[in-house]
Image (tube, grey):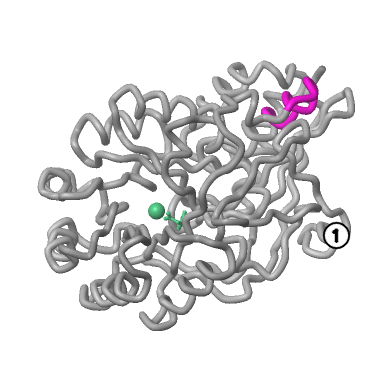
Amino acid sequence: MKIERIETIPYSIPYSHPLRFASGEVHAAAHVLVRIHTDEGVTGIADTPPRPYTYGETQASIVSVLQDIFAPQVVGLDPLDREKVQRIMARTVNNPTAKGAVDIALWDIAGKAFGVPVHKLLGGYTDSMRVSHMLGFRPAPELLDEALRFRELYGITTFKLKTGRRPLSLDVEAARVLREGLGEEAEIYLDANRGWSANEALEVLRRTDGLGLSMLEEPCDAAEAMSRRRLVRLSPIPVVGDESVPTPGDVARELLSGGCNAICIKTARSGFTQAKEILGLCTGLGVDVTMGNQIDTQIGSLATVTFGAAHEATQRRAGELSNYLDMADDLIAEPLTIRNGAIRVREAPGVGADIDELKLARYRQDT
Ligand code: MUC
Ligand code: MG
């Protein structure tokens, strides 16, 4: 089998309400659908969510790096030779989401070619993941309404609160309102997307002491090395690296230097291959992992479930899998369902995301 071509389709689907957080806001899923076609008619699928303000990738940059840099080097290769493709892409630094999509599409091809679901190929630990829902910036009473609604409708009991605002009292108050409204059983953790300084984050930890928060994600820029290490030493809860750790090398550097002591894995930016390398580093060092959300569609969320359910360590915590519910529509042919707070993997060969061609025709931006 040979890779014949990489198809890159920019599309845009509006959000029913925007998601706002310290490093940006999203009003539409302006993504790139990637399909890798082979000479044997097997096609691998991946969704590519650019986060321009985080990684500097855009729809145009993703299409360009895939068509102009990677496609000429990988067309003609056996799609099962994933390590060859990894080494080719590694020559080009950055572009994590473009690389992640190629890798996921190749795993999809492998699953389809062997007739097995990719969650089995990756590890097959279990068949579902508990869902954590991410709450963007909104007034505290609205946040609580959303969390209560999601608990009622979907059985979700884990919530990630977007923080990183000034004055700090905005986020301290939101955390307090959520805890009081959701009760002791709910898991609540914070993600500041680098919105604070390390010392501000310490102040927030002091002021939320007693609320039973479980984790603090990307509180400040990891480049503030000295004060960030002090924060990690003093924090009573794990400090999670997210956008500071897109690659295994970044994970090793941040863990070894004390810049974080837990790791957020996002399949959108790591693909399955690098996500496995990151997971190996973390389990080897005894560090907690969370399965994060790069503001993914249902296709992207299915990739996260596929990886997260495949390994013991990634399914321990609830994965961030529900933000597609904020979208007005999706390209996936068979929608995901959240029941009893969990999403199941697909048992079809591959990752299991088929595309609704009519919807693709409606939302694509290149025709
Ligand atoms: C998160 O965990 O930070 C926001 C930006 C991004 O890339 O992912 C989201 C959620
Ligand atoms: Mg984050």
Which quarter of the figure is the N terminus placed in? top right
Residue 86's spot in the image, x, y percent?
57, 23
Magenta residues, start to end: 106-116
Which quarter of the figure is the C terminus placed in? bottom right
Residue 256's spot in the image, x, y percent?
22, 29
Q: Is mark 1 within 8 Å of ligand 1?
A: no
Residue 244's spot in the image, x, y percent?
34, 44
* Along the line of sight, the residue nearer the viewer: 78 or 218: 218
Q: Quadrant of residue 316?
A: top left
Horizontally, is 190 left or right of 199 in the view? right
The residue shown at (14%, 59%) is: 202
- Relative to 311, residue 323 above or below: below
Label 1 belongs to which residue?
361
- Relative to 335, residue 109 above or below: above
The residue shown at (67%, 16%) is: 81
The residue shown at (67%, 56%) is: 337
Q: Is residue 69 visible from the viewing direction of this image?
A: no
Q: Is residue 194 visible from the viewing direction of this image?
A: yes
Horizontally, is 21 left or right of 16 in the view? left
Majority secondary structure in the magenta region: helix
> At numbered mark 1, what does the secondary structure look like: helix, strand or loop?
helix
The answer to if 27 sits in the magenta stretch is: no
The residue shown at (60%, 48%) is: 61
Question: Few, some or many C-alpha atoms within 10 Å of disc 1 (few <14, some 14-19, many ≥20)?
Answer: few
The answer to if 112 sits in the magenta stretch is: yes
Q: Amino acid at mark 1?
A: Ala
